[in-house]
Amino acid sequence: MLAFHIGPCRVRIDFSFFALTAFCCIFTGAEGGLACFLAVCIHEAAHIAAMLALGAYPSKAVLSALGCRIETAGQTALTDRGNALVSLAGPGANWLSAALASVLGLSGSAFCGASFALAFAHSLPIEPLDGGLAMRYLLRGIFRADKAERISRIISTLFLVPLSTLGFMVLLHTRYNYSLLALAVYLMLYLVLKWDLSVP
């Protein structure tokens, strides 16, 4: 674990993040590992930039293999719409990065692939992915909090079934690529047991 301060914000990088980076380097090479790292940095930087634009300043950030958990100092409470915008900023930045890479003739690069994968995954309306969190925040603007959560869980489950099937098909086809299936299993455990491995 590595901890340091950037101004008033305490940043902690868990061992799991370094383990994921090493995993990417082993299976995709140094270029693939660097591409994944850059895509993640752009993703999280977009979240923080959106928070700052809305007047919420992070006091603590914990980076792990499952993303970055950011806590604010509490001086500005974001609205549900503000939280939705913050959630969507991450995948939005990755979509933009993938599009720019394609325009520049780098559609086959590892960076473009990593950006697209991160953008696609976090755009899915499945909690606790960014798309799922944004969906719940927007639903809370229409329904009561408990009803919004129930609807969000139902929609998440409906999208999780084909995602799990696709992950299983990818594993059968490639005989080694289990990453999508592992993501689906984690999301299923989160929905059923609230087993959130991203909690510091």
Image: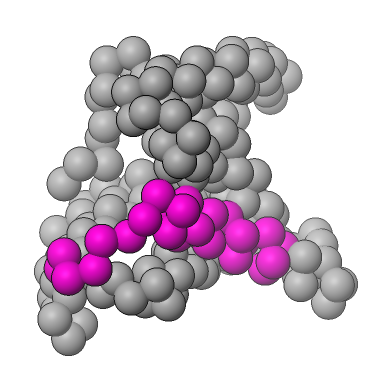
Left or right of 172: which side holds 179? left
Estimate the x, y position of residue 118 in percent, counting from the top left. 57, 50
Query: Measuring 61% from the left and 60% from the top, which residue is drawn there?
Result: 92
The quadrant holding residue 72 is bottom left
Q: Is residue 88 magenta?
A: yes
Left or right of 50: which side holds 19? left
Pick the residue in front: 197 or 182: 197
Left or right of 48: which side holds 56? left
Estimate the x, y position of residue 44 in percent, counting from the top left. 42, 64
Pick the residue in front: 59 or 119: 59
Query: Measuring 82% from the left and 66% from the top, which residue is drawn there?
Result: 102
Pick the residue in front: 85 or 40: 85
Q: Which residues are magenta?
A: 73-98
The reply to whether residue 37 is in sight is: no
Per the picture, the main secondary structure of the magenta-coloured stretch is helix
Query: Measuring 26% from the left and 35% from the top, which residue is drawn there?
Result: 197
Query: Measuring 83% from the left and 77% from the top, which residue is drawn there?
Result: 104
Estimate the x, y position of residue 151 in percent, counting from the top left. 48, 20
Say if 32 sits above or below 184 in the image.
below
